[in-house]
Amino acid sequence: MMADNRGMSLPMFRSAYPWLIVCCGMLFYCYNYFLRVSPSVMQNELSQTFHITATQFGTLAGFYYWAYTPMQIPAGMIYDKFGVRIVLCAACLLAVFGLSIFIASDDFATAGLGRFMIGLGTAFAYIGTLKLASIWLPPNRFATVAGLTTAIGMTSGALAQKYLTKVVELIGYQQALHSAVIAGILLSVVIIVLVRNRPKSQIAFAANEMQNPIDLKQLLAALRTIFTNRQMWLIGIIGCLLYLPSSVFLDLWGIPYLKAVYQLKPEEAVAISNYTFYGWIISGPLIGAFSDRIKRRRFPLTFTGFFAALLLCIVFYLPNLTLSSLYGIFFMIGFCCGAHPLCFALGKENNPLQISGTAVAVTNMLIMAGGAIFQPVVGKLLDLHTTSPIGADGLPVYSSSDYTFALSIIPIGVALGIFLSVFLKETYCSSPAEEAEDTALKPDSILEPEVEPAK
């Protein structure tokens, strides 16, 4: 009987082991989301520690995006050259090192360096998870992993805000983040122990395996094709504007806004903000499936964007909303924003199939640029608008009207994105014809499999 149990357990372990490896990548993406949203619940503490204004606070948080955004394109090439195991572990340790610098810093410049290094390390999280999935799992599990990773990451962001709100109040932000340093070190050990670059049997799924990674010359050829495509610039700008509710509001300014405007306790502000995550998580797969079914990208993107802008205007410009209505409105904002991943599909479908992976990476880079640009812009608008007296700590005190003025950039940006979407070319869920591919690129110039966005 014991021998039978051992015989049964071995095949079960072998079937579960690939998923265990992919889960290591998912855990790193969760760690990335935790670090990304952490400043949103620490505004008061960070402002007092470094004696900074809202502009500087937005810039401090934006350092993350300044490293994260441009690394999306080279990350895949680095994985192809050095393998997932060592790169994923090194990226995790780099993020931990950056977090350690951030915790130990006593001036703005050093803290900014720490945030920059966090962004540099975590830029490898999402694409590393998808790389592992492409090697270790069957092709029909790839999209499942992509969607599941995104959902788990957003759930991690919601839980991170809830956890940090309580712990920061009790022991301060530095002590609260020490646990994240320990968790990152343990995660890097788990990665180096469990993750392998490929199965020993060398049995891979050719459709997903990156057997022929592109070199620098081929990458430049792909980028030239993409950046001379006017639709790509339009898609990137629209995606950036429609992602502002996440990159600007959820990731940084939402909780300070709710506390200042609605006089909410930190726990209540976090709870309401989290409902946006929940709506986003639920709607993403549903709207994506709906878009695939009707074979349209522009209509769902424009339709949901219109309601997202309308709901944001209600939040910012209709006073005295009840607590229960805020929960419902923020959930629906997240639900409407769930159509945003269609921008990645548009980016892929507006370019030849051979460079679809690079096209998606460029789309993601343009979209994520919104955090680097607009997080500091909101802080600058706060400082320009405030007329409140300086507080006891020597820092400006921002009123509800200051926050409303500064964050108006979000509904305005979403509305502009809807207007620009009128000029999008509908792809009908297909890429350019093969003849167009031949004219866009020289033969054999790009040999690249299709990958999901490196979020």
Image: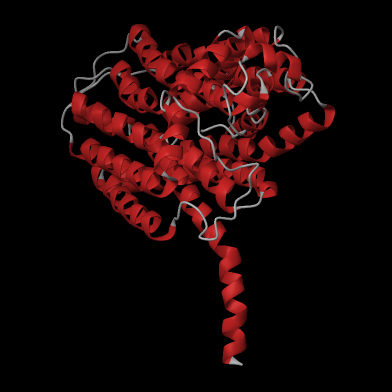
Q: Which of 174/153 is in front?
A: 153
Report the coloring of the rendering.
Answer: secondary structure
Residue 418 horizontal/vertical position (percent): 66, 12
Seen as rendered, the residue at the extreme bottom is: 1
- Is residue 120 at all visible to an observer of this figure? yes
- Is residue 411 at all visible to an observer of this figure? no
Residue drawn at 61 percent across, 71 percent down: 12
441 lies above or below 100: above
Q: Is residue 161 left or right of residue 4?
A: left
* Quadrant in the rendering for residue 100: top left
Q: Is residue 335 left or right of residue 408?
A: right
Q: Which of 40/265 is in front?
A: 40
* Quadrant in the rendering for residue 13: bottom right
* Quadrant in the rendering for residue 287: top right
Count how many numbered circles sit on residues in the image.
0
Q: Is residue 385 left or right of residue 30?
A: left
25 lies above or below 357: below
Residue drawn at 31 percent across, 44 percent down: 168
Residue 258 horizontal/vertical position (percent): 47, 28
Q: Which of 339/142 is in front?
A: 142
Q: Quadrant of the N terminus?
A: bottom right
Residue 199 horizontal/vertical position (percent): 52, 57
Q: Is residue 448 left or right of residue 264?
A: right
Seen as rendered, the residue at the extreme right is: 294
Residue drawn at 63 percent across, 17 percent down: 309
Residue 417 horizontal/vertical position (percent): 62, 12
67 lies above or below 226: below
Seen as rendered, the residue at the extreme front is: 443
Q: Which of 166/140 is in front?
A: 140
